[in-house]
Image (spheres, rainbow, N blue to C red):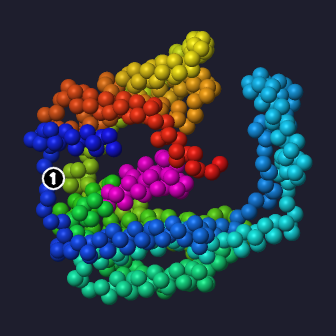
Amino acid sequence: LLYALYAFVYALLNPEKAPAVPMGATNAEPITRGEGFTWLLGLPILLIVGTIVLGNLNIVGSQSIVVSSFSDIGAGASLRTNVGDECKAAMIDLHGQDAWDTAVTEQAAIEAAGGQQASEKLSEVALEQKQADKVAAAAPIGTGMAIILIMLALVLTTARGVSPSSDARPLIIGAIGLVLAVLVDIVLVSPTTTSGTMVLLMLLPFVAVMYGVVYGLKRCATNELIRVVFPPLVLIVAVLGSILGGITNPTPAAALGAGGAIMLAAYRKLKDMDRSPKIIIWSTLAIVISILVGVNFDLRINQDGVSFESWFAFFVAYGAYLYAVFGLLFSCWILYTSGVLSPVVRETAKVTSMVFTILIGSQLLNLVVISFGGEHYIQQWLKSFDNELTVFLIVMLVLFVLGFVLDFLEIIYIVIPIVGPVIYGGTFDPKWVTIMIAVNLQTSFLTPPFGFALFYLRGVAPASVTTAHIYRGIIPFVLIQVGALALLWMFPVIVTIVPDLIPN
């Protein structure tokens, strides 16, 4: 928000230096205000809000029937009390005798009320009853199915909004398919339904849905704004969504982003060369199919008693994977033969080697500090201050200055383990301390001489833009970072309001 405000004010004060923004029409046909509001804003908001409301009413929710074979642990005391004498003495020394006595009283009250401190293995009867209770409490519509149907519905509404005068019958057929899919999921699909049976039940509704969606995507492609913005947006959502959704960790997600960027570039190059990009489109679809099959089917074929549907799903996912790899290699070949890939690889190698040289030097510095016991001296010096606010300000100032000469990874590896026990052991909210440190570390991306963002910008900037230009240009953004730190310092609730709403 602060960056956007700065860009807006800069454009107002220096209109001659602001980049030109084309204001031409982005749609092939005129759209009235009512049509745009209904199909592009009103219905999408209604669908999303309606799904959230249904989730709160437990109509949309998890259909997982996985249960633990052990009983749940009851409410615990503020401190663990079932510890040895040595650990007890250490906890009293850390938290105080009053906190220990309070924890003992809490644990006695919990045990008197029938609570337990340890899990117990459930019997077969209790396990079956627990699973039956979970099946009975499951939502009629699964969360994954609801998300897929909402995304497909948004394609239909967007297609209607960008071209209201086109034939609406395929979109109506797709909408009918969505309704049938919801009814089938409620009436015929239960939490105990196998994945293969669910696919067969959903086959006919999804044929109707995909008929309307394919027609809708073709209509959306006539809109210049959607055609330009939507593919990179999908790539960003796929990378971040795979991380935040727990599908994969950041390393494969980064590979997904790199592969997607290569395929997008190859698609555009094929369009410029007046060649068919169908291989890229089918490869993208193959990636989606492999992910959906992997999420919904058990693909572990190295175990005993593998069912036919698991074998079938494995070969479908494996075939989709092979075709996706073929599409990626085909994209690389197109970019290589067109002279696009080679200079990109060379520039990437230059920047990467420079960055890793800096990382190696930082690791050497880390080894020197640890070898001479520097962290112990620093911790003792910080503990000598009576006011923890002074200690925190000193640490933040040191982090800010180190951002000029070290990247954020090395600051985390070297500085945070040293000062962390001191600043996290005070009365400040740990969530607020963490965000303050994270915002402060963002300066390491921007500040010379070792700002990673400056190296990346230097690699893609034209020759007319010198390093001195880049160094001068980052000054306002560093000031914005300082302003953001001051804002979070004065109003800590900005950081803590959302985590406080999340239940433990």
Residue depicted at 40% across the width and 30% down the height: 486
The magenta span reads 231-260
> On screen, 462 above or below 143?
above
Instruction: Specify whether 339 is left or right of 450.
Output: left
Q: Position of residue 109 (x, y in %)?
A: 86, 44
| Image quadrant in which you'd find residue 193 | bottom right
| Magenta stretch secondary structure, dominant | helix
Q: Quadrant of the N terminus?
A: top left
| Image quadrant in which you'd find residue 334 | bottom left
The answer to whether residue 239 is magenta is yes
Q: Position of residue 382 (x, y in %)?
A: 57, 15
Secondary structure state at the residue bearing disc 1: loop
Residue depicted at 88% across the width and 47% down the height: 111
Dot 1 amino acid type: Val
> On screen, 258 above or below 198?
above
Residue depicted at 66% across the width and 63% down the height: 302
Instruction: Specify whether 152 is left or right of 291.
Output: left
Instruction: Name the residue that disc number 1 marks.
Output: 21
Instruction: Specify whether 221 is left or right of 381.
Output: left
Residue depicted at 51% across the width and 81% down the height: 181
The answer to whether residue 143 is magenta is no
> On screen, 273 above or below 203?
above
| Image quadrant in which you'd find residue 338 | bottom left
Q: Is residue 320 visible?
A: no
Q: Position of residue 76 (x, y in %)?
A: 78, 44
Residues 58 and 62: in front is 58
Residues 458 and 63: in front is 63
Q: Position of residue 198 (x, y in %)?
A: 58, 79
